[in-house]
Image (cartoon, helix red, strand yellow):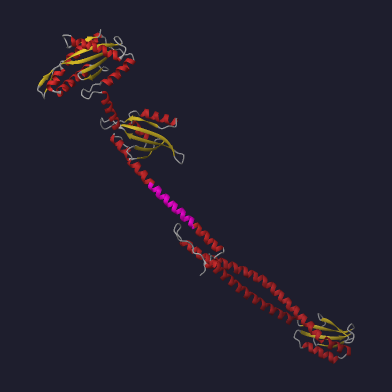
Amino acid sequence: MINKNSLIFKLAFGIASTSMVISILAGNIFYKSTYESELKYALESVNQIELTISNTASIATYLNDPDLANEVIIGLEKNNIITSAQIRSIEKALASSLDFNSNNAISYQLYSPFMKTEVIGKILIHPNKPLIELRAQQIADKNLKVLIFYSVIITLISILIAYYLVTKPFENLSFQLSNLIPGNCERIKEINLHANDEIAITIHNINALLDKTQTLFDQEKTMRLEIETLQKRLKMLFENARSCIVLATLDGDLLMFNKSCEELLKKIGVPIHNNFNDILTLVFDNHLGLIQLVLNAVQNDDVAQGEFKLKNHIDDSTYWVQVFILLTKAEDNIEYFQIFLTDISARKEEIKALSYQANFDKLTQLYNRHATEQKLEQMMAENINLCLLIIDLNDFKPINDTYGHESGDLILKHISKQFKSSLRKGDIAARWGGDEFVITLKQVNKENASQICNKLLDKIKTPIVDKQQNVTLKVGASIGIAFFPENANTLTDLINCADQAMYRVKRSEKKHDFCFYK
């Protein structure tokens, strides 16, 4: 069953319709031509008959012989294409058919048998027009039927040729195409009967297109696998990053954040908010400074970076983060904030510890000599009036030699605590080395210095019990005092002046005392 929407049906219908129209037009022309041709042929036959009997009719007319003329008429009547006839001489009719009527008769002249130019009469013939027309119509009808038959045969042959040479190959091509999966190795099979024609070119072009499609699919598959791999790696980096990573809009709406961000906020007791601006005041100790840093960076098309202390809402632990905030424009030209927070609390503690180790004595927790010199240099550069005390312990070496370093360390720690409890805020106490200490007093006169020294001497000679040795330990001290800028303008000279005053006390009979540089 041919589908009415199929190509073969449309092609057959087109060919049949065209053939029918052509057949009708050609049949009408052919019918008319055949009919006229048969009429002409019949009239020519009448002319031929007239030529055949014209000699006999001429003799009958010349002899004026009615019997001979009548025989000619009888002979003519025997031919079915002639209905009646008459032979006439110049004077009269010699012989006639019974129903002869001269109206519409065909007239032929009769010439003398002896003189071909002398007209001696004429013969009048009535052709059998109904019979002639009927024969012409029958012949025309027959020829038209033959023409229609051959037209139908040609139409059917054309349809079959079109089907097997055009439609069927295209149906096969369409079937193969409908079952092909783009991107695989299957291709359209070539048709032997169409090795070099348009169908072969179409199949070749389709296969070339399939080759390109497969190549594009392979490339896309490879790219998709690479993208998936890259996405997995980026996701792994994002989720497992030790730093807190946040993506936010310019209005502060949080779009993405990783696990480290959740852990950091949880560690300081801050819940996740949908807006980063709401988190700022809860998270950062100096959130206004951070906002100003970001605004400056945006204006200068730069990266906002800095170290900021976090607010701990859980305990007294201190947390610091390294902040990086940069403005990023996506493919859709929408701008976002990329925020990176790295916990540097441990590094801060390490730096603090290293700074403490670099500036403080490990045993006494007082400033060491290096840190004290730097602070003194700075204060002298600022022209701050200073009073420098150099304190050297008396009777410390015998304790150290007799009871050991543990007892000596116990004395040093005890004296350091006494210094811390006796000094004002802003004064500096330092272990200068061994059993020697330095104290720096700001903005004091000799009277104030004397009061402080007496207090320090009382604290120093306070005995302490060494429980391990089960012994009471006691030391004294000699204190030398010098003023800046009264006694010296440089640190070295100031130390030398205080040192000279201290040794003056040591050489005196009363070692447990203080002395001003003179």
Q: In the picture provided, is 326 more to the left or to the right than 207?
A: left
223, above or below 26, in the image: above
Q: Position of residue 282 (x, y in %)?
A: 32, 32
Residue positioned most to the top = 518
Q: Quadrant of residue 309?
A: top left
Of the pair 39 and 94, the residue shown nearer to us? 39
Q: Identify the image quadrant of residue 45.
A: bottom right
In which quadrant of the rendered image does the C terminus lie?
top left
Residue 80 horizontal/vertical position (percent): 75, 86
Viewer-nearest residue: 181 or 509: 509
The verdict on residue 98 being magenta is no
Residue at 21 percent of width and 15 percent of height: 391
Magenta span main SS: helix
The reply to whether residue 482 is in sight is: yes
Q: Nearer the viewer, residue 499 or 471?
A: 499
Position above or below: 423 against 84 = above
In the image: residue 365, left or right of residue 127 = left
Q: How many marks?
A: 0
Q: Can residue 250 be seen by looking at this rendering? A: no
- Residue 126: image x %, image y %? 79, 83
Stretch of the chain drawn in magenta: 210-229
Please check the rendered image and state whether residue 212 is part of the magenta-colored stretch, yes or no.
Answer: yes
Q: Residue at x 44, y 30 (%)?
A: 300
Which one is nearer the viewer's eye here, 483 or 240? 483
- Can you say whether 436 is above or below 240 in the image? above
Return the residue found at the far bottom: 67
Q: For this view, does 179 lie left or right of residue 150? A: left
Name which residue lies at 25% across and 12% down: 498
Residue 341 % position (x, y)? 34, 35
